[in-house]
Amino acid sequence: MNGRGMTRRDFGKVGLAASFAAWTARRAAAETNSDTLRIGLIGCGGRGTGAARDILNERNENVQLIALADVFEDRLNGCRNSLENDGDEAISGRTNVDDEHCFVGLNAYQQLLETDVDVVLNATPPFATPRHVEAIVDAGKHVFAEKPAAVDPVGVRRVIAAAEKAEEQGLSFVAGTQRRHQQEYVQTIEQIHDGAIGEVLAMQAYWCGGYPWSREREEGWSDLEYRIRNWNFYSWTSGANIVEQHVHNLDVMNWVKNGHPQSVFASGGRAWMPEEEIYGDIWDNFSCDFEYPDGTHMYSFSRWWPGGTDGSVHERVTGSEGVSSCTDMGESGINPFVQEHINLVNSIRGDGPYCNEGRELAHATLTAIMGRMSAYTGRRILWNEALESDLSIVPDELDFDLEYPVGPIPVPGDA
């Protein structure tokens, strides 16, 4: 029984009834399209190319990739060649991108949205996600958006607004937080919700990985080109590792609690990264103590360290009657990177539950951002303080002729 006197089953019935109108509108919209769903991809790097492969998988019938957009021509060409020459006929045979549907430049995403695509995959660096998701929904397209949703609170609010508009229009919105589509997680967390380990007393989340990729600056690259090509290491392009990668684990913790934390107290630092342009202005480790409204604490640890790490990426929930890894009570299923796209297509066609994960993606992202805000300022940060913050770290103007200096590296107490 929740605080309003409703059981979980009652709440589910209300949610089902509330979404019926959106489902009906979505079904009607899908029926006005051709039998084949036309796919467009914004962001043609490794993750974007992977997302295209995942949606073109053989389990999804009548889908076709018809348009590509990227800031850089070499990335677009690499993606196009890889997909057209893929050994899997389901992928290569359904990649039908002509030259007129290849768009390059900072405004390439807008040009792609002017085509007749039905579904848009957005796999750009995090700084661009809010403006792209906003534009995709405004164009009346279904959305797949890679995580995280944003790098700052202003961007998070834009994604929340876009998710609400998508629901009003009956548009499907699936996020790249693929654990929500991984059968082991789905089945285990359902059992946790049903009391399999008793009352949840504490939680732990880890993304303690090794040094990620980075790129040396090449001759002729402007500041903006280098920031985007080396986007992992700048706060305004990636949000730092706590936002870019640890968002996965934090999303699982919010899922377990069916909500978000009310506050966080965090610390961290820059233990090994030299003060060089290639390593940007982010910290390389964060430790956070999140508190949820019912008093449950979740301890969060994330870092990028070269060596001296066991590659620990996992979650742990301690209950009054047991402990769970969040996957230990479930059975293996389809690759979750593929399953999320199966669920997206089924949602669009009305062949499965309606999917709109925009709010969950935004909430997980803000959970990570408030952890970073707490660490960088040295203060406890409240959820509403973060959500309502005017903090916006993405430059208002993006231009290859402008300078984008690095830093400064945050010092607690400076802000």
Image (tube, rainbow, N blue to C red):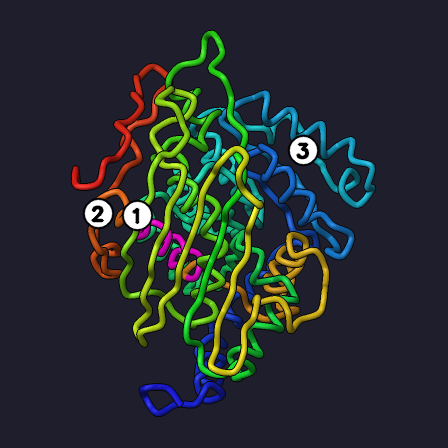
Direction from residue 384 to residue 234 in the image, left or right? right
Circle 1 or circle 3, nearest the eye: 1
Q: Is residue 303 visible?
A: yes
Q: Quadrant of the N terminus?
A: bottom left
Q: Are marks 2 and 3 in contact (CB under 8 Å)?
A: no
Left or right, 287 with reference to 140: left
Residue 322 locus on image (x, y percent): 54, 78
**Observer-nearest of 216 and 304:** 304
- Residue 381 horizontal side relative to residue 276, left or right: left
- Dot 2: what SS? loop
Tell me which corner region of the image, top left, top right, bottom left or bottom right, holds residue 128: top left
Q: Residues within 10 Å of mark 2 (few under 14, many from 20)?
A: some
Q: Position of residue 216 (x, y in %)?
A: 49, 17
The one nearer the camera, 76 or 297, is: 297
Estimate the spatial distance between the alpha carbons at disc 1 and disc 3, rounded to whole Å: 47 Å
Q: Residue at x 67, y 33 (%)?
A: 97
Is 284 placed above or below 342 here? above
- Which numbered disc flags the more N-terminal residue, 2 or 3? 3
Quadrant for residue 28, please give it. bottom right
Q: Earlier in the sequence, mark 1 or mark 3?
A: 3
Q: Residues within 10 Å of mark 3 (few under 14, many from 20)?
A: some
**Residue at screen point 60% across, 72% down:** 188
Residue corresponding to mark 2: 378
Residue type at mark 1: give it: Ser
- State the mark number for residue 97: 3
Residues rendered magenta in the picture: 360-371
Residue 363 counted in the magenta span: yes
Rate crowding at label 1 as few (under 14), some (14 to 19) or many (20 or more) other CA atoms within 10 Å. some
Of labels 2 and 3, the one closer to you? 2
Q: Is residue 154 visible?
A: no
User: Pointer 1: what residue?
Assistant: 267
Magenta highlight on residue 86: no
